[in-house]
Structure formats: structure tokens, C-alpha cells
Amino acid sequence: MAKLMTSESFDIVIVGAGAAGLFAAVFAARTGRRVCVLDGAEKPGAKILVSGGGRCNVTHDEVSAEAYAGSSRNAIKKVLRRFDVPQTVAFFAEQGVMLKREDTGKLFPTTDSARSVLEALLGAARSAGVVLRVATRVERIERQDEAFTVSGGWGQVSAPRVILATGGRSLPKSGSDGHGYKLAQALGHTLTPRIFPALVPLTLPHDHFLCALSGLTTPAVLEVRDRAGRRLVMFSGSTLCTHFGLSGPPVLDISRYYRDALLNDPEGTQLVANWLLDETPESFDRVLLEAGRRSAWRVLGERLPERLARALCAAAGVDASAPLTQVMREARRGLARAATALVLPITGDRGYTYAEVTAGGIPLSEIRLETMESRVCPGLHLCGEICDVDGRIGGYNFQWAWSSGYVAGVGAASDNTLT
């Protein structure tokens, strides 16, 4: 691809060719503005291609601000409603990508291929006249008079408007290595005090009995509790035991809340698993008490995978094959707690390399939500994961990318001083 010349100028330069950046580019260029997108990777859209197991969970059939954390939900709501789910579905349909709803409410392309989503975005950008430059890492953005100079080892370009869509720190191999934060800070922005991996698998001690159940998947309810035992947040769904700890939808969803609570109270925060869903330690203890001469693993085995049933018995120090009439009261109650309120000794998480999104970033309080323009650096717009917004799994983070990218693109293009 041709090298950029130092004399090139555009109406809008977008840094980052991910979901939010490409979306911003399409809608900015459709107004007739001259738009250039710069991306440091050899090929754009790497995170799109690996999302949803390679299928790309484009959005969810019902998206509300309650599915997000970070900045205030009222602020998030203002951006989401500017480009909603029906508009997202319509956009991709226009590009020939039809979406299907799965039982979970997630919307995937009917092709079951993330590449079709990326090609739709790139095709829409080409049709709108967007100039895309890859392998062009931006090292500096400087504001001079009424224009920005965007530069790197490849040269420089200028524009009166710049959109930062660099992502956060999740999946750094895709190019979102946190460099965008430095670019924003150099232009006057601050970062949230906490920036950490979200939607990330959690780790347990290598010798924990759940690690020995690697590959086992079963429904569970997970809760973050404070030192008084009060529930702070709860998620439920299919939970996967792995050689390193735990994964699966509820684990990923709860990971950012557990990490956040842990930062507030390292000693008093607990993550608790209930393998029997609606049961409590008290109710299941009654079940065990009334089981008579039946064995513990047979009672548990009616509700749980056999491997997990036997492992819970062993963890509670109960002979899995012995009649429950022979199990001492404290041991029986211990088994009830292990099955319905197992405290998980989480040692950490798998980090940004395995995180689907980043918690923290540029506070929305520093951004004008009508246009996603910076309050501290006029002419600069921000969108996507670089903002302090992170959603649950299920297409919510992509919807934030589409919504905020649209608002940033249209907002940047609405500058009356552009010619």
C-alpha cells in the first residue's frame, strides 16, 4: 500500500480501524467529508475476526444501559439511543449481512462468520470513499492552530478533526495495547484511576479440585459478596471448569465486578458458586437429611455431573458412597455449603491477552455526548473501548462500538468549518 506523504491532509483522521473506528469512518465519509483511517496492524479488524468464537456477536436483541459498567448509565444511555439495535440490524442488512437471533438474545450473522461482518464494514468504508492505511502506527497527535498533525515513522497527515478509536488494552496482539491512552493524555485527557481486564477467565490455585475437572461444563450461580456476606452482584449460566480455573459466560460477566470489589476490599471480598442454582445451604442440607440411606454422590448426581458430584463430596470430606445416615451433621452441612455456597479462592485472571474488553479508560464526563467531542481538546472525538464503558458478553460491547462510532463520525463531520 502506498506510503502516506507528509503533505496529505483530510477533513477527518481516524486512529484505529476496529469496529468503532470503521463505523465512525463510514458515517463521517457519507456526509462527503474526506476521511482517512490509520491503523498500526497489517490487517484491520483483528478483534472482529476473533470475536464470538469467529462468528462475531454483532449485538443483542435488547440493549439497555443496565448491561454496562464504568461511566454513569445515564451517560451511556444517551449515546446508545442515538444508534440503536434496529438501526444496527438495518445497517448490516444494507451491506448484505443478515443477522439471526439465538435463544440467548444474541444476534449473529446468518453466515456464522465474523469475516462477513468485517468485509461489510470495509466495503461500506470503500463505497463512502474512506482512505484506509494499515501498518501505519500513530505515535503522536499534536494540535496546532485549528488543525491536528498525526504522525509516526511513516510520515504525517493533518486534519482539523481527529477521532480516537484505538481500543483499550484487551487482546493486545490485535493492536489495542493501550497506546491510545497515551495519545489522549498528551491532548489533555485523564484516565480513570482503575483500568483492568474485563470479560476475562478467572484463575484458581493449580491444585484446586475444580482444575482437575477441566472440560466440565454445568450451570451455576456466581455471586460477589462483601465481608458481611451481602451479595453485590450475581450472574448465572453455563460455567466451564478449566485447567487454570473457571470460564464461561457468568465467569466472564462477573470478573470485572469481582476485580472492582477486590480493589475496594481485598480481604473481605468473596466469589461464591452455587452449583444447585435455587438451593441454599439450609434447603439442601434438608434434602441430604431426608435422603436416608442413599449415598451423597447419588443425591448430588441426580442434579450434577458425576465428576463434580464426587469432587464436591471429597472437598467436603464426605465419603461419596456411604449412606447419608452415617455422615456426621457437620460434614453433611459442609457438603451442603460446598454444593450451594462454595467460596472460590480466586488467585487472579488471565489478563489482557484473554480479556474481551477493558474496564476503565477516558471518563464520559470529559466527552460531549451529543458528538463524542472532547471537552478538553476541541476537534478531538473519542469512541469505542477507549472510553470508560464496558458491557456484558452478548454483543453489548459491539453495540457500544456501533453507537459511539456513529455519534463520533457524524459529530466530527458536522463541523461547519470543514470545507
Image (tube, rainbow, N blue to C red):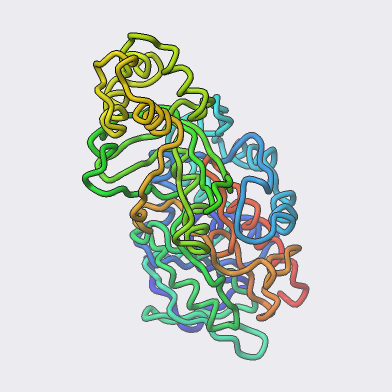
Identify which residue is drawn at 47% across, 57% down: 259
Number of residue marks? 0
Q: Nearer the viewer, residue 71 or 29?
A: 71
Identify which residue is drawn at 51% across, 34% down: 236
Measured as percent of width and height from the top left, residue 172 is found at 37, 61
- Whether 354 is drawn above or below 37: the answer is above
Q: Nearer the viewer, residue 35 or 297?
A: 297
Q: Is residue 40 left or right of residue 145?
A: left
Q: Quadrant of the N terminus?
A: bottom left
- Whether 60 is drawn above or below 290: the answer is below
Q: Is residue 314 left or right of residue 5?
A: left
- Whether 245 is drawn above or below 221: the answer is below
Q: Residue furthest top?
A: 293
Identify which residue is drawn at 50% across, 39% down: 57
Q: Is residue 263 left or right of residue 188?
A: left
**Residue 319 in sight here:** yes
